[in-house]
Amino acid sequence: MMQKMSKYSFSSYLRQERLRRNWSQKEVAEWLGTTINTVSRWELGQTTPSLYFRAKLRELFGEQPYEVEQISRDAQP
């Protein structure tokens, strides 16, 4: 079972997955149809992605549906 994650953990996960693939924030933003500022805010833990963007992140990272959903849900205050 996945351990509960904080906002910081979600932001770290997102940044780590992006960097592991050698993608820039700009590339991720373009693929998701959002802005660099939005991706940056997610990575800084200032905001978390909506359900729409969680689905897009699942597709982008090739994750199972529960993985990004659980990480995002655990990051909510």
Image (cartoon, rainbow, N blue to C red):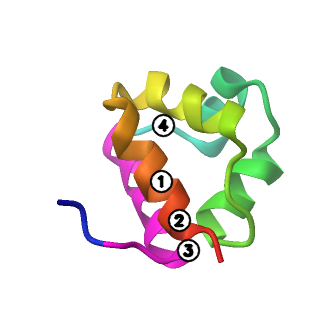
* Circles 4, 1 touching at the beta carbon (< 8 Å): no
Q: Secondary structure at mark 2?
A: helix
Label 4 crowd (10 A; few <14 / some 14-19 / many >=20): few
* Residue nearest the viewer, comparing 37 with 59: 59
Q: Earlier in the sequence, mark 4 or mark 2?
A: 2
Q: Which residue is mark 4?
A: 23
Q: Magenta region's main secondary structure? A: helix
Is residue 59 among the parts visible in the rendering? yes
Q: Which residue is mark 3?
A: 7
Q: Which residue is mark 1?
A: 14
Tell me the mark number nearer the camera, choosing from 3 and 1. 3
* Circles 2, 3 touching at the beta carbon (< 8 Å): yes
C-alpha span from label 4 to label 2: 15 Å
Q: Secondary structure at mark 4?
A: loop
Tell me the mark number nearer the camera, choosing from 2 and 3. 3
Q: Which residue is mark 2?
A: 11
Q: Please tell me which residue is depicted at 64% across the width and 22% down the height of the picture.
A: 31
Q: Can you say which quadrant of the picture contains the N terminus?
A: bottom left
